[in-house]
Image (spheres, coloured by chain):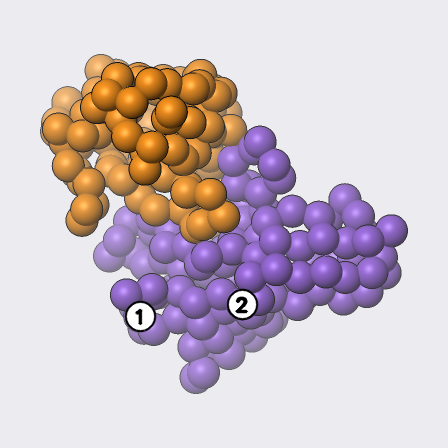
Chain colours: A purple, B orange
Amino acid sequence: QQQVKQSPQSLIVQKGGISIINCAYENTAFDYFPWYQQFPGKGPALLIAIRPDVSEKKEGRFTISFNKSAKQFSLHIMDSQPGDSATYFCAASSPGGSYIPTFGRGTSLIVHP
Amino acid sequence: SAVISQKPSRDICQRGTSLTIQCQVDSQVTMMFWYRQQPGQSLTLIATANQGSEATYESGFVIDKFPISRPNLTFSTLTVSNMSPEDSSIYLCSVGGGTGDYGYTFGSGTRLTVV
């Protein structure tokens, strides 16, 4: 059973556009929701994360929107750049699970110049 | 955040052989984690490695296939035993903490191809 569902599987955006990746979870014990960015040949790196006590968190061009009642959260990349081309994973974790992340399936983002 | 060195970065192995992957962390950590990332797929936790005790394996993974060593607080190895083409994946070492509130740090991975 996939605990964190991520969509779309792939996304193509023009430079300067907005990239949006969506995730949904089922386990209400999750209380930490990170996004990881992975470039080819590299391991995933933490990009931005949110706790459920806020509905939005912004860091530069990256914003997480969180809807606790719907058990959904999303990553918005504003003014997308070719350097943002990577695979993005949403994840969720809980204190009972030592905050070990459960990952979504990943979204391959391509930003065309 | 911790810096993880993982090697080899890639290898091509014959069916039926074994490969040991090494993970070195630049600071002492209580738990180290091993993940598998199959082509185009998500990251799946294989096991958690604690120093001084047996590794804890996730459902679907067994010690005979993926033996893990954790001799000290900065080092761990994962062995992929009796390999088959289905074991072709990226294997990643990870440690918790140090990035964000509860973010995890990953090594660059070992890309394994079994022929």
Residue A41, percent from left and from top: 58, 31
**Residue receiving disc 2:** A7
Q: Residue at x 61, y 36 (%)?
A: A40
Whether residue A93 sits left or right of residue A90 in the image: it is left
Residue A64 sits in quarter: bottom right
Using the image, name the chain to which the residue with label 1 belongs. A
Q: Closer to the observer: label 1 or label 2?
A: 2
Q: Residue at x 45, y 50 (%)?
A: B41
From mark 1 to mark 2, how far is it between C-alphas?
Answer: 18 Å
Residue A5 sits in quarter: bottom left
Q: Residue at x 33, y 18 (%)?
A: B14
Judging depth in this view, the residue of A101 and B78 nearest the camera is B78
- Say which quadrant the N terminus of chain A sits in: bottom left
Whether residue A98 sits left or right of residue B89 in the image: it is left
Kind of residue at disc 2? Ser
Kind of residue at disc 1? Asn
Residue B95, percent from left and from top: 38, 34
Residue A50, percent from left and from top: 52, 62
Can residue B94 be seen? no
